[in-house]
Image (tube, coloured by chain):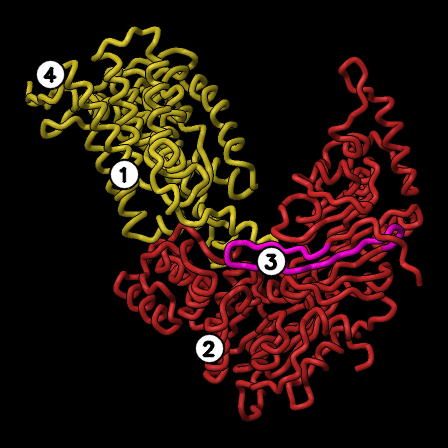
Amino acid sequence: MAVPAPVLTMSGIGKQFPGVKALDGVDLRLSPGEVHALMGENGAGKSTLIKVLTGVYPADTGTIELDGAAVAFGSPLEARQAGISTVYQEVNLCTNLSVAENVLIGREPRRLGRIDWKRMRARAAELLSRLELSLDVSAPLSSYSLAIQQMVAIARALDVDARVLILDEPTSSLDAGEVEQLFMVMRRLKEEGIAILFVSHFLDQIYEISDRMTILRNGRLVGEYLTSELSQVQLVAKMIGQELDALERLHGEARVFDRPLIEARELGRAGAIEPFSLTVHEGEVVGLAGLLGSGRTEIARLLFGADHAGTGEIAVGGAPASLRTPRAAMHHRIAFCSENRKADGLIPDLTVRENIILALQATRGWTRPVPREQQDELVGRYVKALRISPPNPEHLVRDLSGGNQQKVVLARWLILEPRLLILDEPTRGIDVGAKTEIQRLVAELSDGGVAVLFISAELEEVLRLSHKVEVLRDRRLVAELPNDAELTTDVLMETIASGGRDS
Amino acid sequence: MRRLLWPAVVLVLLLALNVFFTPSFFSIQVRDGHLYGSLIDILRFGAPLILVALGMTLVIATGGIDLSVGSVVAISGALACLQISQDAGVFTAVALALGLCLVLGAWNGFLVAGIGIQPIIATLILMVAGRGLAQLITGGQIITVNSEAYKVIGGGYWLTVPFGVLIVLAVLGITAFLTRRLALGMLIESVGGNAEASRLAGIRSRGIILMVYAFAALCAGVAGLMISSNVSSADGNNAGLWIELDAILAVVIGGTSLAGGRFSLGGTVLGALIIQTLTTTVYSIGVPPETTLLFKALVVTAVCLIQSPSFREKAFRRRGRTAPPSPAHEEKVRVTA
């Protein structure tokens, strides 16, 4: 297949942030009339690459060529004027304005300094008809579905004479029918010769719509492939980074788990996770594996009462339980370290000591403060046990490094002596030393009879720690695999890629 | 406490300015068994503002704001005076007035925490409607009362000390106890610092928010009693007019962020004293009346600027290079995910 001359070439792109090499020698070519998927795990550098391309950040090294001429955009506006338009994951539109206003915002046709509404509506309708959409352009945008809103965003992006269209996870909040609608529009734009850069975490969608793909891992280029020549298993392996070394498992002998702690039956929440059944036994470590957005976090939040379940029921220790709020879950001694410790975990203005005793204090209410001696004793013990650094409990938690912040959140839950500890990506973004310590801690807790639900994007880690692994894909629990000698990262990847269809 | 440094410096400067113009400014005498002097006046006239600002501090620490306190001041005074003018006992009148204030505060808290209305809008309702309510209670008139017992609250003395100052000390003591000895302060700071994380840590933020609005209204109610007692009359129109703005200003000068989180009761007291001293200064150094507001504005601007770390950095050019990595960088690293 002859590849036409690329409309856009990025070569040797490097980008350094303080302490992090976000991009290192990345190449990307986009040809006219193709849908090009940009693939990579969380933190692989996809967003950074897009931001360098659209002028949000300057590149440290490397060149960008548009139609053979070197360009460097100082701002997204400049990129847009040069024909590179971006539609972001969250629809950046004003739902209270009309469709026409949204399409032409900032470029309203004017007459004598005033907005020419008639021409504005006509122009908006014309742009939308290019996407085979016929809408009432004077209706407020909020009266249309998310998919239509997404397409209005695309129409707005195409108003400028776009040659490159970047779609950053446009489908994450759409249902299957809406995705189909979006794909129709994408195919039509492709026929017009527009190059589309498509980012999505849904593998099936990538295989349905894309022609070629570029894969990144840890800020580096893995390679460029024709979609038709790369199987889903190969893709997942390349994204995650295959390590075929024998894995050290932290759990030695096989144990029998016969005392169910939490049983979820057909638990589900519309738009978040399809109904699933899951049993966690005392002392058992259950790993959740799946790509980002596959529903791992959603399961954790339902079990902790952070979100309300729409369907299904939960039993704790054999008795039906209602976990409608985090407090109710805490009453059953369930603890949850969330994935996003900045947004959902830490109170940055409070000290290490205050952050650690927060959950304990919450269970006691404000009238019964934890006595200061007990605070100092508990905090001192966990600062030492988890090797929180600096070991000063009066330090503001905002000044700690990521790994130490994670340990503070862990300590907060450990002092409650939970029966089920839910850990959502507890080792993400922290250094190797802290990582091993947290893994060891999980193994110790499990030996002591605590059940752990362990979520991680790193399959090796999941395998090393878990007694059984639940595999998720596209917001469905697709398989439950006992962690025996036959379970390897390859098998896991295979299961994620195939969606458990042949297992 | 480093962050009390700047408000304290400003207060000292203001007081020094006064001594410069009025050498006898610091003298305190005992006359008729009462403490007497400019400093005592500042404390006495500043007492209602300190009370309102204390309540406001806790509300702001949860990330909210309460615009209705001025109206609550008027309602409290109006109801108490109406009761006394109808021959009710002073205790009954005070209890009824404070009870109503608690209900009004709980209403604010319900709108914010129960229904989820933005605090500025939720309390704006009572700010506007409350003035009407106060006028309804007074029948549109200024109610004048003649009760020696009621007069004590705002105008009396006990052991030579103005009674209002004692009330402030008591309320300050109780607030400090509830927030710093008990765990209320930490939970308030937690809710204000990160509401979602607090919820996931099992804190019942609704109850806490309801409580701080009720507390703010109660403080405003006591201030209202003080103001109306001092003049032995209730004016539904003008009692406590704009005091909410002074209170917010006092909180901000005291170093509590409007975004919520960490709060400082001591800072708020300093802030309220700065505002009251400023008013006194305007009179004592003879600023012409037509430039009074401008003078106040200039001083407040200066205070706010000197409080701002980024302004100090620019103005004094220190710590420019050794500053810790700015949050902007972290932000950038995070979005690469």
Other residues around mark 2 within 10 Å, as few (<14) / some (14–19) / many (≥20): some
Q: Is residue B326 above or below residue A262?
A: above
Q: What percent of the width, then of the height, locates residue A101?
A: 78, 30
Other residues around mark 3 within 10 Å, as few (<14) / some (14–19) / many (≥20): many
The letter of the red chain is A
Determine the CA span between mark 2 and mark 1: 42 Å
Q: Amino acid at mark 2?
A: Leu
Q: Amino acid at mark 1?
A: Leu
Other residues around mark 4 within 10 Å, as few (<14) / some (14–19) / many (≥20): few
- What numbered label is drawn on residue B23? 4
Q: Do dots 1 and 4 share one subunit?
A: yes
Q: Name the side, left or right, on which A263 lies relative to A435.
A: right
Label 3 sits on residue: A22
Residue reaching furthest to the front = A69
Q: Name the side, left or right, on which B293 lies relative to A344.
A: left
Q: Amino acid at mark 4?
A: Pro
Secondary structure of the residue carrying numbered label 2:
helix
Determine the CA span between mark 1 and mark 3: 41 Å
Determine the CA span between mark 1 and mark 4: 27 Å
Q: Is residue B79 above or below residue B317?
A: above
Which quadrant, please, contains the C terminus of chain A?
Answer: bottom right
Which quadrant, please, contains the N terminus of chain A?
Answer: bottom right
**Residue at position x 36%, y 70% in the image:** A382
Label 1 sits on residue: B4
Label 2 sits on residue: A441
